Amino acid sequence: MMKKRIFLLMALLLVGAFLIPAYSQEDMEVVDDAGFSKKQRPSAVFRHDEHNEKAALEDCAECHHVYEDGNKLEDESSEDQSCSECHDEEGSGDMPGLRKAFHTNCKGCHLAQEKGPVMCGSCHVR
């Protein structure tokens, strides 16, 4: 009887060890990095709604920008598109490559606001 209880307890602990991380990952979101043919780091962890609430961002175009002839269009948003639809890996002319576009947009804002992560491992969690 005692062996059965110990076995049951161990089984419950084992199941719990798998369920807790699985549950916490349900709300985890990452930056869409499908445009990269060879990834150097894991996808950047980014909880969109949590980030925008904490940063008090209400204008989608703040991050989801649209440019025309080198000028940012203030009333336009690209939220229905993936970043890689405009930015290729290498970039060309005034259009930065995908990696530079992500880093300029995200890290640039964090540096300007003096808030948020700027070190690689803070966003690209292994």
Image (cartoon, rainbow, N blue to C red):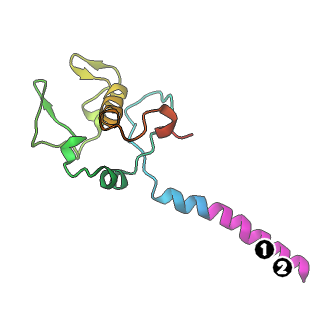
Question: Where is residue 63 drawn, in percent x and y?
Answer: 25, 41
Q: Nearer the viewer, residue 99 or 112?
A: 112
User: Residue 5: which disc?
Assistant: 2
Instruction: Name the element at disc 1.
Output: helix
Q: Which residues are magenta?
A: 1-19
Identity of the residue furthest to the right in this view: 2
Q: In screen coordinates, is 124 left or right of 97? A: right
50 in the magenta segment: no
| Residue designated by label 1 | 9
Looking at the image, the residue that sits furthest to the front is 114
Q: Residue 35 lies in what quarter of the image?
A: top left
Spot occupied by residue 32 in the image (x, y as percentages of width and height): 38, 41
Q: What is the three-letter code of the residue carrying label 1? A: Leu
Q: Main secondary structure of the magenta part?
A: helix
Instruction: State yes or no: discs 2 and 1 in contact (Cβ < 8 Å).
Output: yes
Label 1 neighbour load within 10 Å: few <14, some 14-19, many 20+: few
In the image, 119 versus 27, the foreground residue is 119
